[in-house]
Amino acid sequence: MTGLMQGKRGLIMGVANDHSIAWGIAQKLAEQGAELAFSYQGEAFGRRVKPLAEKVGASLLVPCDVEDSASVAATFDRLGEEWGGLDFVVHAIGFSDKNELKGLYADTSKDNFVRTMVISCYSFTEIARHAAKLMNDGGSLLTLTYAGSVSVMPNYNVMGVAKAGLEASVRYLANDFGPRGIRVNAISAGPVRTLAGAGIADARYMFSYQQRNSPLRRTVTLGEVGGSALYLLSDLSSGVTGEIHYVDSGYNIVSMPTLEELKK
Ligand code: NAD
């Protein structure tokens, strides 16, 4: 199967390096003929993203710090100038102070709560608003979430609260833009070893626990998240919007550890 994304142009936000979930998604989209633009957060990330963008023949590389509304607006102005239109956006961005991704959620500071919400939750709404203006013929918007939004995961703390807000935003945005044929969905990925993932205290225990206790008895690969993103960003999923799609080896359906684990 090739060419699913032929003739489609989109922006990938959130590649930090070749372990990033956004990079797994970008590769799948490029394989299927998508024309890609990448945004990066600051020059240090830019230097790492440039060779990756070149690898998949990206036509545009733009700086964008989502904490700064002017930077977000400038990114979409640039896309408008270069392309005139847009078919999809991947938002794979999250941040919280790692000092608060441990201990009690109750100890979250107001400053970090607000910053986490702005970067990890509000940015998707702001991006969707800009992107929709360039989507003249429908489109697809995708963000990344984690199951710490719906149940408590050790140390995920304020990120869980931000992801709950992000998932609610997916539903509201899907309803706002649905009449224009613009779909909005999220992938709730199982744990993947990335830079952001490493910021969560004791993440390696969560990783190996999910490996042992998910129905598939393993975690997911970047390619698997990428494949599901390809479905949600392509016309294969033309009837799907407002969905939180789990790509987690089935971990979300189990309510208990495996018997092997319980009997240890
Ligand atoms: P990553 O560190 O590779 O990517 C996070 C990205 O967020 C980086 O590219 C970083 O530059 C960007 N970012 C942070 N603050 C920003 C800002 N102010 N402006 C612009 N960009 C900013 O890690 P990842 O795990 O690939 O994370 C991508 C998304 O996937 C995040 O939303 C994360 O919460 C989500 N997610 C990750 C996992 C996991 O286990 N790694 C699981 C489920 C969901």
Image (tube, rainbow, N blue to C red):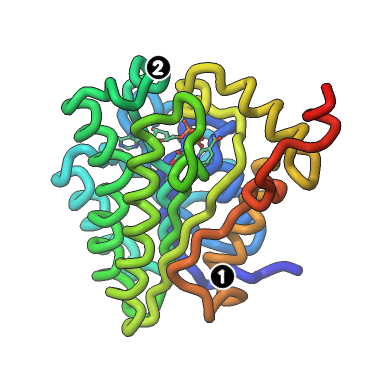
Circles 2, 1 touching at the beta carbon (< 8 Å) = no
Give the quarter of the figure containing the N terminus.
bottom right
Q: Which sits in the foreground, 81 or 100?
A: 100
Horizontal and vertical percent position of residue 137 = 38, 81
Q: Is residue 220 left or right of residue 137?
A: right
* Vertical side of 196 occupied by 5: above or below: below
- Across and down, in percent, residue 20 comes to 54, 36
Residue 103: mark in rendering: 2
Query: Which residue is located at x 62 percent, y 49 percent?
Result: 252
Return the residue nearer the eye: 55 or 117: 117
In the displayed structure image, the side of residue 242 where residue 109 appears, left or right:
left
Note whether ligand 1 is within 8 Å of mark 2: no
Amino acid type for the residue under numbered disc 2: Gly
Give the residue displayed 49% in from the left and 50% down from the top.
58
Q: CA distance from mark 2 to mark 1?
A: 40 Å
Residue 234 is labelled as 1
Tell me residue 80's x, y (percent).
26, 63
